[in-house]
Amino acid sequence: MMPDRDAAWAAIKFLRHGPSAYRCAVTMADLERGAFSDEGPWVMPEDAMVWQRGIGELRLRVAAQVPELVRRRRVPPIQRAAITGWRLGGALLGWKLIDQRRTPDTARAGLSRRLRVAFAKLGPTYIKLGQILSSGEGIFPEELVKEFRYLRDRVPAESFEAVRRVVEAELGKPLEAVFDDFSIEPLAAASIAQVHTATLKTGESVVVKVQRPTVSELVQKDLAAMAWISPVLVGRIPISALANPPALVDLFAETIVEELDFRLEAQNMLDVARVLVATGQRSIVIPRPHPVLVTRRMLVMERLDGFSFEDVDGMKAAGVDTEAVVRAIMVSFLEGAILYGVFHGDLHGGNLFVRRDGRVALLDFGITGRLDEKRRLAFLRLIVGATMNDLNGQLGALIDLGALPHGTDIPDLIKDLGLDGPPIDPLAITPEQLLEEMREVVKKLLGYGARLPKELMLFIKDLLFLDAALATLAPDVDIFGEIAHVAEHMATRHGESIAAQIGLEPGEFEIDLTGVKNSFGVGEGVQAITHRELQERRQIMQKRMEAHAKETKRKK
């Protein structure tokens, strides 16, 4: 344990058991600094949080490791590369010999299943990659997303003896010196870490996130192996979203390296909590990280509970307004991204609880989007451009975000992609026409050098979760109405600041959802659409595509 950590721990014990009025005053100060629970288990004086020292430099050092980790070496880590090649090669060979001969849908499903099995056998790094892919509905193929969801909650846990060794190494003392109780069975086990419930000697109920013992070293070897193998896979994986495996490896490396240091995650929690206070958003609650018990491989935090995100009946029985829940998540997410450049980067049902008072407890901050000022302003222009139907502004923002190369001719791109024409309703054309249209769009985008930067991928992934959240919690709410409501909220609360930042006069902002409606494949005449209606359209389209695939197979 660091020499000054014992002194800090003594200070926390004094504050925890000191005069109640003083503790209350400090707790009020905590609530002014962050969106935390009303009655915190401890206070967080800045001078006690020694793990924060040099956190900015630590974040930069961690990010600087990525190019070296994904540099393609002449010789990969032989043993790991051989195992990886064997597993992935076997999956591709099995697909080629068996599944490829079937219908396109069946072939994609077969490949996805084989890759999921291979990822599970390859261990934590690949399981983490699969988990990221599993929350990318709309970015990655449906079959892949569906299959890789099995990797979210089917990860074998480390033994308690292994967990004890990590905790005691991080504490520098026996586990019993700090914890009165520590559950042997984990509350949850994921790829990088697992979570245990515990009780501190000072009486607080906590959860303890403990990193798997050898995961850091394994991730480094796996990234080196991935970087060596991925160029070989170019053009050999018949899934369009994975058409550029080296770029996917780079993206994955940027995402996973920060997760290996829990001090960065604790700081992410504090930063998001501060943003929520700055925007006046009190419908979201962040668990307090412990002011002292945070290290590279161990994170102790306040224990929060609530309804699981899928327990809609339980929420409604408790009087929770589920529509308000979705709206709060959407508004806080957008405000964090476009006003402060910080947002939770891995929204999914497993990372959320809905409390009985209707507030949302947001968990797991290992993946967080962080934007420098240039990219934050680009995100701001992208969102404002979408609500104003400003195509030039949106594409210019994508260039600044790195999704399109600098020098891209925007008018030519608009013309080539047909963005200046009427929307294409997928139900109004044949499956052959739809497939051809999709192939052409992908081909043209790749021709322009389009790519998916990390922050944009996280942002889109979160938007897709919000789309799914509407389906779960508010299926009969008008989607266009909700988008307009959020836009009006942003304009009313932050309009003057937003206008000044992107060079608009306040009166120039006018909501125009034409482009949004086009992206849904509906015309301007459609004034409202619920998620239930949208899902019905998708199901019709899916059945038509399946019928087309069967007919194509019959003719062969």
Image (cartoon, rainbow, N blue to C red):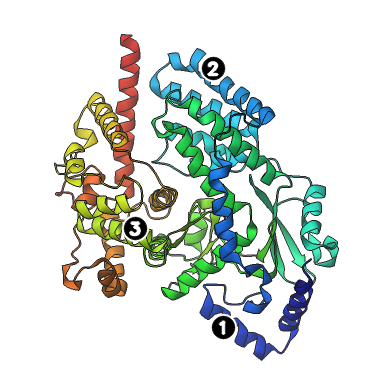
Q: Could you say whether the residue bearing mark 1 is in a helix, strand or loop?
A: helix
Q: Residues within 10 Å of mark 3 (few under 14, many from 20)?
A: many
Residue at 40% from the left image edge and 40% from the top image edge: 139
Residue at 73% from the left image edge and 87% from the top image edge: 18
Image quadrant where residue 15 sits: bottom right
Q: In which quarter of the image is the N terminus?
A: bottom right
Could you tell whether 285 is left or right of 448 in the image?
right
The residue labelled by disc 3 is 379
**Chain-order first, disc 3 or disc 1:** 1
Mark 3 to mark 1: distance in Å? 32 Å
Image quadrant where residue 20 sits: bottom right
- Residue 241, horizontal then vertical, whole percent: 41, 34
The residue labelled by disc 1 is 29
Circles 3 and 1 in contact, beta carbons < 8 Å: no
**In the rendered structure, which amino acid carries the disc numbered 1?**
Ala
Q: In which quarter of the image is the C terminus?
A: top left
Mark 2 to mark 1: distance in Å? 60 Å
**In the rendered structure, which amino acid carries the disc numbered 3?**
Phe
- Residue 172, horizontal then vertical, whole percent: 82, 62
Q: Nearer the viewer, mark 3 or mark 2?
A: 3
**In the rendered structure, which amino acid carries the disc numbered 2?**
Leu
Circles 3 and 2 in contact, beta carbons < 8 Å: no
Determine whether 389 is above or below 57 in the image: above
- Given the current orientation, which residue lies at the most extreme front position? 74
- Residue 137, horizontal then vertical, whole percent: 42, 42
The residue labelled by disc 2 is 93
Q: Could you say whether the residue bearing mark 2 is in a helix, strand or loop?
A: helix
**Chain-order first, disc 3 or disc 2:** 2
Q: Which of marks 3 and 1 is in front?
A: 3
